[in-house]
Image: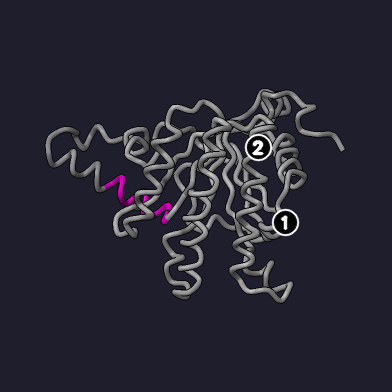
Amino acid sequence: MADVSDNAKSAVPHHVAIIMDGNGRWAAARGLPRVEGHRRGVDALRRTIRSAGEMGVKIITVFSFSSENWSRPAAEIGELMGLLRRFIRNDLAELHKSGVRVRIIGERAGLEADIGRLLVEAEELTKDNTGLTLVVAFNYGARQEIARAAQRMAEDVAQGKLKPEDITIDTLGGFLDAPDLPDPDLVIRTSGEQRLSNFLLWQSAYSELVFVPVHWPDFDRAVLEGAIREYQQRERRFGGLTAKTAQAGS
């Protein structure tokens, strides 16, 4: 089986976004507590960051904790926050050494103080790195992100900084959490579920979607390569026609 690195580098997606799903089901299938699935999921994240960088991906965005996840049992939320703390404290130095730039998207208001400080530390330490950009969607929901953008835009209108008639798609996009980053070329969801679940709804308007059956703790380089190969076989039209389909009269 050919490695994706054998293909033209231009065919490797610049930005890959991943919905990391199935930690709990992975654990349940093995008679393990859910937290063990989350722990193994952190291992999968480490593998994925390393593999994506080696394969030529420039940006990887991961859905680590959604706005809706707060409805989970308090004990599980506590375990997840603990894993986040340990990941940043234990892995940040290695990510920085590898040239990874860390970005965080999502709502930060109301987070525990030490969590907020760790997120800022991760971004500040790595802000000048030029390697892979790791975007962590934490306490994130796409609808909430769009609502925040609309609120910020409305404030500018109220203050006379922006006219209502000047509001465009690009204008609103400029108020999102990370407007400087390009939209994802490829969105991968693990565990066989086939929905976006409030993840990057604005940015994924023309992304290619690939759904893989493996649970996130089992995600590895081979699965990532398979998803990228599927991406490479598709024609991206962005609502129009490629030269190939135009000639065929599609």
Based on the picture, tell me whether residue 147 belongs to the magenta stretch: yes
Numbered mark located on residue 108 in the image: none
Disc 2/disc 1 C-alpha distance (Å): 16 Å
Q: Establish if 174 lies above or below 202.
A: above
Span highlighted in magenta in the image: 139-150
Based on the picture, tell me whether residue 133 belongs to the magenta stretch: no
N-terminal label among 2 and 1: 2
Query: Which residue matches tag 2?
Result: 52
Within 10 angstroms of label 1, few (less than 14), some, or many (20 or more) residues? some
Asked whether, in this view, residue 83 is left or right of residue 194, the answer is left
Q: Secondary structure at mark 2?
A: helix
Q: Residue at x 36, y 41 (%)?
A: 176
Asked whether, in this view, residue 131 is left or right of residue 66, the answer is right
Nearer to me, 36 or 179: 36
Indicate the colouring scheme: one colour
Residue 144 at x, y = what percent?
36, 54
Nearer to me, 40 or 3: 40
Q: Secondary structure at mark 1?
A: helix
Asked whether, in this view, residue 29 is left or right of residue 113, the answer is right
Residue 230 at x, y = what percent?
74, 41
Q: Residue furthest right?
A: 1
SS assignment for the magenta stretch, majority: helix
Q: Residue at x 74, y 43 (%)?
A: 221
Q: Residue at x 56, y 39 (%)?
A: 94
Nearer to me, 229 or 249: 229
**Which amino acid, mark 1?**
Asp
Within 10 angstroms of label 2, few (less than 14), some, or many (20 or more) residues? many
Query: Which residue matches tag 1?
Result: 218
Q: Quadrant of the C terminus?
A: top right
**Which amino acid, mark 2?**
Ala
Q: Establish if 106 lies above or below 236.
A: below
Q: Quadrant of the N terminus?
A: top right
